[in-house]
Amino acid sequence: MPYKDLFFDLDHTIWDFELNSKETLWDLHQKYALAAKGINDFDTFYSQYSVHNHRLWDRYTKGFIKQEELRWKRIYLSLLDYKIADEALAREMSHDYLDILPNKKNLFPYTIEILKYLQRKEYKMHLITNGFESVQFKKIKNSNLSDYFIEVITSEASNSLKPNKEIFEYALKSANAKVESSIMIGDNESADIQGAINAGMDSIFVNHLQVTPTVPATYTITHLKELENLL
């Protein structure tokens, strides 16, 4: 099918969230001297943070908690694992985390090359993200991604979250795109792939982690370079 509009997810798809987040947490570990507070093994601390972050993001996308609670509680629960029940510290670290994170620039391999390739082929490219709007725009700018995307659709602007069809409908309208000539490209099966299905849109599952797929995407790839074979 001849696609005209490509809708990319940002985090975990082209912007390497895990690596950038880990670097940010390391910066905070040093700044707040967490080793002196009993958090000696940074890798374990980061692993526990990732578990809390994933669980709270799941609750956020399902509407059980608000954005502000997600922001500070993932830090608070990580500290609490070490018996540090300090909400003020968690809130301060949360503020710094969101300040530092968007300055990180790690992208997945071949990101810029594939975006240039798709741009040369005259695809119109856009982003659909559940991430916090102010943070996402900073990431895009600092990672030199701004020139590749026409529309950036956030959950805040659309008043909806992936996988709800409303955010995809908002994206299509913002991009003046038709669903039958559009495709969603993302790493998250429940948000990106199921969301595309909900909106009646084709999808490409970017299976960086090479997990067993559970949601039927139109196409599946394990490396961004494989987009050259599809588009």
Image (spheres, rainbow, N blue to C red):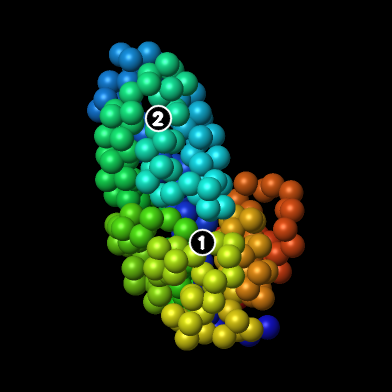
Viewer-closest of 39 and 75: 75
Q: What's the CA distance linking mark 1 and mark 2?
A: 24 Å
Residue at disc 2, secondary structure: helix
Q: Residue at x 44, y 27 (%)?
A: 78
Mark sitting on residue 76:
2
Query: Earlier along the polypeptide chain: callout 1 or callout 2?
Result: 2
Q: Quadrant of residue 137?
A: bottom left
Kindly identify the amino acid type of the residue bearing the numbered disc 2.
Tyr
Dots 1 and 2: beta carbons under 8 Å? no
Mark sitting on residue 44:
none
Asked if residue 155 shows in the view, the reply is yes
Q: Residue at x 54, y 76 (%)?
A: 169
Quadrant where the image shows the C terminus: bottom right
Q: Which residue is mark 1?
A: 161
Quadrant where the image shows the N terminus: bottom right
Residue at disc 1, secondary structure: loop
Q: Residue at x 52, y 56 (%)?
A: 13
Kindly identify the amino acid type of the residue bearing the numbered disc 1.
Leu
